[in-house]
Amino acid sequence: MRKLDEIRSDLTRCDSEIIDLLKKRLDYVREAIEYKREMGLPILSGDEKEMSKELLLEEMTDSAYQGELLEIFKQIKEQSKCVESKVLFPYNISLIGFMGAGKSTVSNYLKETLAMNEIDVDSMIVKSEQMEIKDIFEKYGEEYFRNCESNAIISLKDCSQTIISCGGGAVVREENVKNLKKTSRIVLLKASPESTLERVKNSDERPILNGNMNVEFIKELMEKRARLYQNAADIIIDTDNKTIPQVCEELIGKLLKLK
Ligand code: S3P
């Protein structure tokens, strides 16, 4: 049997080889994403040239550690996405837009595909107040809720690589937009009053819409806020009749074109 010291020194050597290889791999990932950006190639479509799961499995068939190796590779892929996102988006992405515009769904999809962090401002408030939004409105009123919202946004000043999903009314206070702009590019998601109603009509979680669940009210409030949304936005995406992947591909394309 080999001496433990000898085995340990082999392990150390292995670790340092792995680190060297991983550094090399991440450099290639960076190079590939910079190439895609330069050439204007789609960012979200999978990299066909990279080893697919099937090929990886084939490479590992003889190994007693297939399960472990697959887990390690999952992590490698995930961390590769983080490197890509840092290259492409060295800022936060703040999503604004009327209720039902799809901010949470888009945020979730972006978080998965770009391996960025995700924060939902409404959820922060629910957590800190230990109360649902509609209960905060009912018990303390809208002004109190808006103060919570502004404080939550201020508290995000040190976030990085984060998708920030804002409540639909975040733009009504100029200071919120100013604070978001310090670290974020702001993306406005738009939807027509009709599709907004379709998306929100079965929920009673939005106090502003409770008792006002109709196209006329939505249209009027949308119009009242339209200029605020418009002025805050770095880019604007229409979500009507588009799938979430289409919205996200367009969003990424437009962000990459920003200076
Ligand atoms: C609001 C939108 C809601 C929530 C609150 C007020 C608004 O967020 O912040 O009910 O004034 O538009 P969502 O846009 O995520 O529904």
Image (cartoon, grey):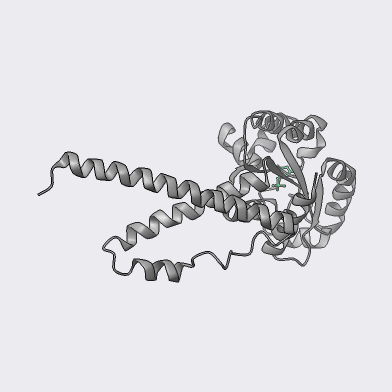
Give the quarter of the image for residue 190.
Answer: bottom right
How many numbered badges does the structure rendering display?
Answer: 0
Q: In the image, what residue occupies the spot 63% across and 64% down?
A: 45
Q: In the image, what residue occupies the spot 13% across and 47% down?
A: 2
Q: Position of residue 251 (x, y in %)?
A: 74, 55
Q: Nearer the viewer, residue 167 or 86?
A: 86
Q: Nearer the viewer, residue 199 or 36?
A: 36
Give the left or right position of residue 178, taking residue 73 as reference.
right
Q: Position of residue 189 (x, y in %)?
A: 77, 52
**Regarding ligand 1, which quadrant of the image does it lie in?**
top right
> Is 247 drawn above or below residue 179 in the view shown?
below
Does any portion of residue 43 appear in the rendered image?
Answer: yes
Q: Position of residue 54 (x, y in %)?
A: 44, 71
Q: In the image, what residue occupies the spot 82% across and 32% down?
A: 174
Q: Nearer the viewer, residue 161 or 69?
A: 69
Q: Position of residue 256 (x, y in %)?
A: 75, 51
> Is 35 drawn above or below residue 56 in the view shown?
above
Give the left or right position of residue 224, taking residue 60 as reference.
right
Give the quarter of the image for residue 170.
Answer: top right
Q: Nearer the viewer, residue 41 or 255?
A: 41
Give the left or right position of residue 159, taking residue 234 as reference.
left
Q: In the image, what residue occupies the spot 62% across and 48% down?
A: 85
